Amino acid sequence: MARGAELLLALIFSLALPALAAPPEAERIRDEEIAVCRDGDLATWPDGRDQTAPLRPPRFAYKSLGAPVEMGETLVTQLLQQALRAWSGCGIGGELLPWQPGIEERRDVVVVLWSEAESRGNFGLANLTQRRLALSPATFRLLRERNPKHDYRQTMQMALSHEMGHFYGLMAHSRRCIDVTSYYHDGRGDQGEQCRTRNPAGRKAFVEYRHVLPTACDIRRCRIANGIDP
């Protein structure tokens, strides 16, 4: 989800700030960026290269063992299904399978699980080789402690949608601030490069600018990566 512990903590602390109402014009621009992918919008960070999805269709199975109390199985399942519905625009399908004995050994299924070791200090982390999407119980607990009023379901939806995107073939991270596959900056501190938006000043009106589900540009990149007419 993020580039290491430094960016993760930055996100947690930003979510702990009081939420301010965004001006209507800033809301309008953000909504348009979610819904419309213009020519020239497909900018990515040089941290990967998009590829054909390793599984077509991508199949996921959720293992609830070790989940935080508030992250009930029904809730996480609903968020996974919402992410899959949103990624369906890519055109290669996607499915959430019920958990059953032995499914963890299947090579055609991505296991979504809670693991501190496998998430490595991130909200979520995709491992395409092992077919694992790991979530961090400790990180979500820290988020709740820092800002109990924040809707943690939004962060969970964003983490699932973002990491799921890697299994749809989006290996590079977007430079559009709004895309669920984005990074806000290149990890080089104040001197580094920032993500792009048509309204840089308006972005400051949002505690979290990134969308929680794939945007029109996320879907367009996915279709291109998988050889489907965008």
Image: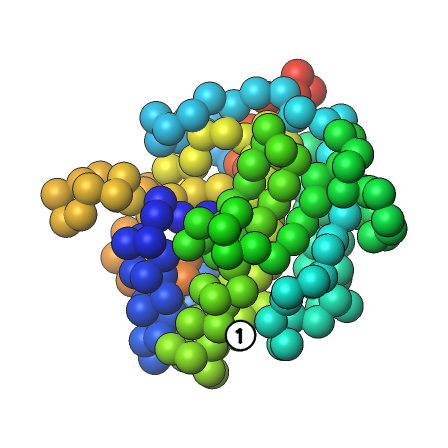
The vertical placement of 157 against 45, above or below, is below
Q: Is residue 152 visible?
A: yes
Seen in the image, is 56 located left or right of residue 69? right
Q: Residues within 10 Å of mark 1 (few under 14, many from 20)?
A: few
Residue 29 position within the rendered picture, expressed as x and y whole percent measured from the top left? 43, 54
> Residue at 53% of width from left, 71% of height from top?
152
> Residue at 50% of width from left, 56% of height from top?
116
Picture quadrant of residue 202? bottom left
**Residue projecting furthest to the top:** 227
Q: Is residue 34 visible?
A: no
The vertical placement of 41 against 179, above or below, is above
Residue 61 position within the rendered picture, expressed as x and y whole percent measured from the top left? 77, 48
> Residue at 36% of width from left, 57% of height from top?
8
Q: Which structural element holds mark 1?
A: loop
Residue 195 position within the rendered picture, expressed as x and y whole percent measured from the top left? 32, 43
**Residue projecting furthest to the left:** 191
Residue 76 position within the rendered picture, expressed as x and y whole percent measured from the top left? 69, 63
The amino acid type of the residue labelled 1 equals Asp
> Residue at 27% of width from left, 39% of height from top?
186
Residue at which label 1 appears = 151
